[in-house]
Amino acid sequence: QQQVKQSPQSLIVQKGGISIINCAYENTAFDYFPWYQQFPGKGPALLIAIRPDVSEKKEGRFTISFNKSAKQFSLHIMDSQPGDSATYFCAAPLFNDMRFGAGTRLTVKP
Amino acid sequence: KAGVTQTPRYLIKTRGQQVTLSCSPISGHRSVSWYQQTPGQGLQFLFEYFSETQRNKGNFPGRFSGRQFSNSRSEMNVSTLELGDSALYLCASSLQGAAEAFFGQGTRLTVV
């Protein structure tokens, strides 16, 4: 079964700082790498995703960087806000489903 | 556009019982995947259905089963419940599978 390794397990940053979460994968069915954000008591919500035609994708304060040769991708949250405090999951596709990293609990201190 | 709807939201069952959870996907989505989420194991893939056919299955015992109906709605069933089955069960729908999957709020199952 495919492994998706995510780090760090937890992250504390100050308001206005940069949050960086990393993921590494073994194999994928195709190149599509999403990040999900989950708040307590809610299901994961699709935050941002990248496809293979670009090495970086930016949406507002959220950026995915993708390194195909290293089989790694990362999420950068610029100007982190207390409202960003949540658990973040990376994922990679295997066959017709997504396999998820273990999650990173982000806490943004005011 | 309505999101993914899971029912019920909360469920308490006794060991040995069975349970059925329901998932209504986003309109037009034909792929439904089920995941089990626990603090220790994270998000673990159960199975995926597309057009009423199970296309892929994770490493769960046969007590876990599912099905999909012609309107893409899906159900999962867990028989002979064990304490370790207590978890948040999530379903996700997408147009064709994997990419751009949207999750429901989940069903919190507690086995006592």
Image: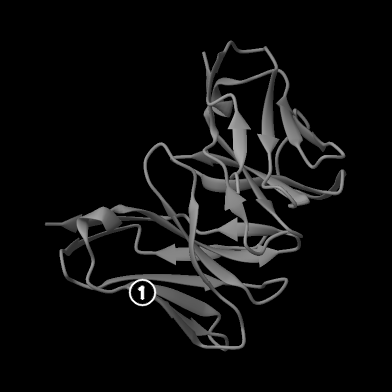
Instruction: Determine which quarter of the picture holds residue B15.
Output: top right
Q: Position of residue A75 (x, y in %)?
A: 40, 72
Q: Secondary structure at mark 1?
A: loop
Q: Amino acid at mark 1?
A: Gly
- Circle 1 marks a residue in which chain? A
Residue A75 drawn above or below residue B89: below
- The answer to whether one can see residue B58 in this image is no
Q: Position of residue B16 (x, y in %)?
A: 67, 12
Which residue appears farthest toward the front when viewing the image?
B1
- Residue ID for mark 1: A60
- Residue at 54% of width from left, 67% of height from top? A34
Residue A104 drawn above or below residue B36: below
Count of marks overlaid on the render = 1
Q: Quadrant of the C terminus of chain A?
A: bottom left
- Residue at 26% of width from left, 54% of height from top? A83
Instruction: Determine which quarter of the picture holds residue A28.
Output: bottom right
- Residue at 49% of width from left, 49% of height from top? A44
* Residue placed most toward the observer, B63 or A84: A84
Locate residue B58 relative to residue B42 in the image: left or right. Answer: right
Residue B49 drawn above or below residue B75: below
Instruction: Determine which quarter of the picture holds residue A54.
Output: bottom right
- Residue at 62% of width from left, 62% of height from top? B100
Q: Quadrant of the N terminus of chain A?
A: bottom right
Q: Position of residue B72 (x, y in %)?
A: 79, 42
